[in-house]
Amino acid sequence: MWLSDRDYLHGMERSLFAEVEGHVVVNLMSNNKGMKWCLESSAQQIGYQPQDSATAELPITIRIKECIAWLGQRLIPSLGKWVNKPSF
């Protein structure tokens, strides 16, 4: 996932000036739609609040190929070995 320069700098600033005892481990990531990482602990521990976000966009040709492969694996399981087989 993506971390913008602005969010990175904000995270570093908060890491330096946060009032914590000992040490903490935090996750710095921009506020990306659909990300699998939780930023709650980062917000609670050091006050990190990301400002930016990004959404991964695949080209239409890749999306079509992925959709056909997904359908093929569900409708004709033996087709998966041909769709995922490298051409080299």
Image (tube, rainbow, N blue to C red):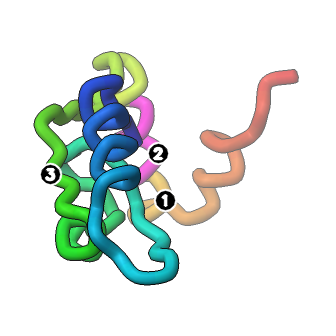
Instruction: Find disc 1 in the rendering and name its residue.
Output: 73
- Give the CA separation, mark 1 to mark 2: 6 Å
- Is the C-beta separation of discs 2 and 3 under 8 Å? no
State whether residue 71 appears in this view.
Answer: no
The image position of residue 77, as x and y in percent, is 55, 65
Identified at 78% across, 32% down, the residue is: 86
Which residue position holds label 2?
69
Numbered badge on residue 2: none
Instruction: Give how far across and how far down residue 22 sits, in percent.
Output: 49, 81
**Which amino acid is tagged 2?**
Ala
Q: Residues within 10 Å of mark 2 (few under 14, many from 20)?
A: many
Which stretch appears magenta? 65-70
Q: Is residue 86 magenta?
A: no
Q: Main secondary structure of the magenta part?
A: helix
> Where is 42 relative to 50, above or below?
below
Q: Residue at x 19, y 74 (%)?
A: 44
> Do tag 1 and tag 2 residues touch (Cβ < 8 Å)?
yes
Q: Secondary structure at mark 2?
A: helix
Q: Quadrant of the N terminus?
A: top left
Residue placed most toward the observer, 43 or 35: 43
